[in-house]
Image (cartoon, rainbow, N blue to C red):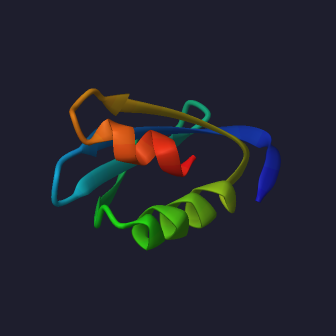
Amino acid sequence: MNNNCTLYVGLDVHQESITVAYAINSEPVELMGKIGTTPTDIERLCKRLTSKAGRVQVVYEASRQIKQLVQLS
């Protein structure tokens, strides 16, 4: 992990899945893929993301499912 880097994460939240993409600093965006929406899936994602950089900035597409995601953070 590089503590001087910022990881920018984009989430497209749906009822059955979350699509995740990210970029480190100004590097090209990479598609991480789809994950599930259970608390365990989201916790696993958070661990993976925080292992990549010292700072993580997350944006998401607004939907009704976001309430569940916000409650987990």
Whether residue 28 is visible, yes or no, is no
Tell me the quarter of the picture where residue 6 sits: top right
Judge left or right: residue 49 versus residue 15.
right
Q: In which quadrant will I find the N terminus?
A: bottom right
* Above or below for 70 versus 42: above
Q: Position of residue 59 (x, y in %)?
A: 43, 30
Residue in the picture at 46% in, 72% down: 40
Residue in the picture at 27% in, 53% down: 18
- Total labels: the figure holds 0
Relative to the observer, which residue lies in front, 4 or 35?
35
Q: Position of residue 37 (x, y in %)?
A: 31, 61
Residue in the picture at 57% in, 46% down: 73
Q: Position of residue 10 (x, y in %)?
A: 39, 38
Tell me the quarter of the picture where residue 4 sits: top right
Judge left or right: residue 32 versus residue 6.
left
Judge left or right: residue 53 versus residue 9.
right
Relative to the observer, which residue lies in front, 55 or 29?
55
Residue in the picture at 33% in, 38% down: 66
Q: Position of residue 68 (x, y in %)?
A: 37, 47
Whether residue 34 is visible, yes or no, is yes
Q: Residue furthest right?
A: 3
Judge left or right: residue 50 versus residue 71.
right
